[in-house]
Amino acid sequence: MRPVLTFATIALVPVLAAAPAAAQAPTGATTPARVRQLLSGLADDSMQGRASGTPGAAKAARMIAETMRAIGLTPAGDSGFFQRVAVSRDSVTADASRGGRGGRGGRGGPRVRLVVRNSFADLDTVPADRRVPAVNVVG
């Protein structure tokens, strides 16, 4: 979900700038300092990298959704501002081009990649321990 959150982060800046003045009343006017504050919060180490399925990703999604709520956007997801996404974690063995080292940076073991499934029915065929709680933030 990192690309999703990155997109949501980038999309948040014009949303803040274009919001009607009345909708901005709870948080005040959009200023470079306010945008910097929001982006700094998303980039902070407390977000733990924001990788899909991590507590950091969930925290960042909540922060973005709260900002959308504060400026008066209407939730457009299947769960308020959150649109659930069918994602699973799959192991990938090292390929010959990596010299059989496996993992990133030469660390042993399989690499893990995230796979967006075609549907939640498809996700239901994946073992529960490989399902990733992922959301897009929409409003």
Image (cartoon, rainbow, N blue to C red):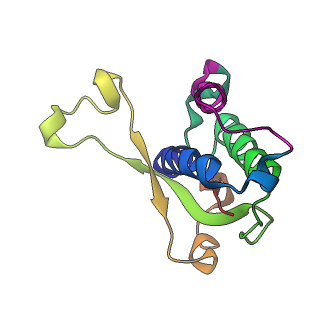
Residue 44 is one of the magenta-drawn residues:
yes
State the residue lying farthest toward the right.
26
Residue 134 position by quadrant: bottom right
Residue drawn where x is 49% and y is 44% of the image: 6
The segment highlighted magenta reads 26-45
Task: Tally the marks.
Answer: 0
Residue 111, image x, y percentages: 39, 39
Q: Quadrant of the C terminus?
A: bottom right
Instruction: Report the side of 103 relative to 29 (left or right).
Output: left
Q: Would you place residue 76 above or below residue 6 in this image?
A: below
Residue 87 lies in what quarter of the image? bottom right
Using the image as rendered, state which of residue 116 and residue 41 is in the foreground.
41
* Main SS of residues in magenta: helix
Residue 112 location, x and y as percent? 44, 43
Q: Which residue corresponds to the image point at 57% horizontal and 27% vertical from the top-left?
A: 43
Residue drawn at (73%, 40%), measured in percent from left and top?
63
Q: Where on the picture, by quarter, is residue 57?
A: top right
Instruction: Please say if 78 is above or below 61.
Output: below
> On the picture, is 91 further left or further right than 59?
left
When the figure is inspected, residue 76 is found, relative to residue 99, above or below; the finding is below
Q: Residue furthest top?
A: 45
Picture coordinates of residue 136 (x, y %)?
62, 58
Which residue corresponds to the image point at 84% horizontal and 46% vertical from the top-left?
25
Indicate the position of residue 96 as horizontal and vertical percent values. Answer: 14, 41
Nearest the camera: 8 or 112?
8
Residue 3 colored magenta? no
Q: Is residue 28 left or right of residue 124?
A: right
**As rendered, which of 123 and 39 lies closer to the eye?**
39
